Image (cartoon, rainbow, N blue to C red):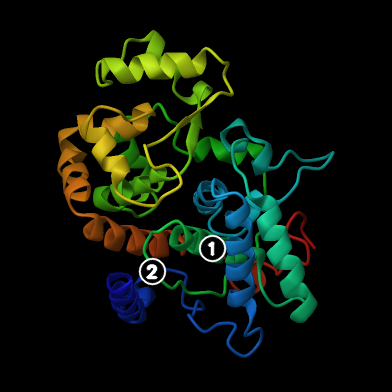
């Protein structure tokens, strides 16, 4: 806890100095709701804690939901919007069907609206929930700037820009680079796969193609998983509900479940980072929290560029 507390102080100091360096985030502040809705963060934290006590696997869903939101149209809560007769939304894309935790966001939003109607955006609630899920699971404690507005667009075709599990390291570096991330930040963010599971449909091609980057015993285990069908689930690392650095150790042992995960160790461009994070969990935690803060500032909507939804599942 002392280490986490120290990292939190350091990260807050970095943000105060470094946040203006991110384009388009001048309106985000740590204390954005200090006067307008002072209990917003506590409500989100308590809601997440309660949900994860009942189902710890929701932590992975909340973290992944935040990532899938920010990578499409920026961090604007677009992944939370339901489809309509006239529009198929992001959440109904095959790439998003494994996301979980929408009800956690709805619950927090309802409680906040009862206290501070029309003040706290769904995109901020999602960003706070992802952060709190990391902390609840044993990961680093860090603060995030708030003040995002919710977007008004959510279309299934936009999810084509999400990195698929078939990407190699060079492709991952390229697609993350287009969003302003370095290779090191990409590997740190990939460490979020220390939480959660993957469905067989995401890795079965590795079995049919005899992927040599995979240990033979892991291949047999994944084959047994897939014998139960495409929706059968496999933990992404041995401690799938704990936020730790076991994911990187698994990659060293050629036990990565997704091709895109194991590719980080297979490639000389990223292998050194995998080794460093596998050896030094504190280093991983520090780099991860900074990369998450940076991700949370992607293409944020401010002012008239967005809105504060009264219901996270539909635009006002």
Q: Residue 37 location, x and y as percent?
A: 66, 83
Residue topped by disc 1: 127
Toward the right, the furthest residue is 85
- Say which quarter of the image contains residue 18: bottom left
Q: Check disc 1: other Cα within 10 Å, few if <14, some if 14-19, many if 20+.
A: many
For the residues labelled 1 and 2, the Cα–Cα distance comes to 17 Å
Q: Is residue 130 left or right of residue 257?
A: right
Choose between 99 and 158: the one closer to the eye.
99
Residue at 34% over, 47% down: 191
Q: Check disc 2: other Cα within 10 Å, few if <14, some if 14-19, many if 20+.
A: few
Toward the front, the furthest residue is 53
- Report the disc number at residue 142: none
Residue at 49% over, 80% down: 29
* Quarter occupied by the C terminus: bottom right
Choose between 24 and 309: the one closer to the eye.
309
Q: Is residue 300 visible?
A: no
Q: Is residue 255 left or right of residue 119?
A: left
- Say which quarter of the image contains residue 12: bottom left
- Report the disc number at residue 22: 2
Question: In terms of sequence position, does the residue under pointer 1 or pointer 2 come before the other?
Answer: 2
Q: Residue 285 location, x and y as percent?
A: 30, 59
Q: Residue 297 location, x and y as percent?
A: 46, 64
The vertical placement of 7 against 238, above or below, is below
Residue at 76% over, 80% down: 115
Residue at 59% over, 42% down: 99
């Amino acid at each position: 806890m002392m280490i986490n507390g120290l990292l939190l102080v350091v990260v807050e100091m970095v943000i105060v100095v470094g946040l203006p360096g991110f384009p388009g985030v001048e309106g985000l502040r740590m204390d954005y709701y200090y006067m307008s809705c002072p209990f917003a963060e506590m409500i989100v934290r308590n809601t997440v804690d309660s949900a994860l006590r009942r189902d710890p696997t929701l932590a992975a869903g909340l973290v992944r939901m935040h990532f899938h939101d920010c990578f499409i149209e920026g961090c604007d809560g677009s992944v939370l919007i339901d489809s309509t007769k006239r529009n198929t939304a992001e959440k109904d894309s095959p790439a998003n069907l494994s996301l979980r935790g929408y009800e956690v966001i709805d619950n927090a939003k309802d409680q906040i609206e009862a206290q501070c109607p029309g003040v706290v955006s769904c995109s901020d609630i999602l960003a706070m929930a992802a952060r709190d899920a990391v902390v609840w699971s044993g990961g680093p404690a860090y603060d995030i700037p708030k003040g995002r507005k919710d977007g008004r667009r959510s279309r299934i075709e936009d999810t084509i820009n999400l990195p698929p599990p078939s990407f190699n390291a060079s492709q991952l570096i390229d697609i993350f680079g287009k969003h302003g991330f370095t290779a090191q930040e990409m590997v740190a963010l990939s460490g979020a796969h220390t939480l959660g599971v993957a469905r067989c449909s995401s890795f079965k091609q590795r079995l049919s193609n005899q992927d040599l980057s995979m240990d033979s015993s892991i291949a047999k285990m994944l084959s047994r998983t897939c014998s139960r069908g495409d929706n059968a689930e496999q933990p992404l690392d041995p401690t799938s509900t704990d936020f730790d650095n076991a994911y990187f150790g698994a990659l060293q042992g050629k036990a990565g479940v997704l091709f895109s995960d194991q590719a980080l160790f297979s490639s000389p461009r990223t292998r050194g980072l995998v080794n460093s994070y596998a050896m030094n969990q504190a280093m991983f935690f520090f780099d991860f929290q900074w990369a998450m803060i940076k991700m949370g500032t992607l293409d944020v909507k401010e002012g008239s560029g967005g809105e504060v939804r009264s219901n996270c599942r539909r635009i006002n």
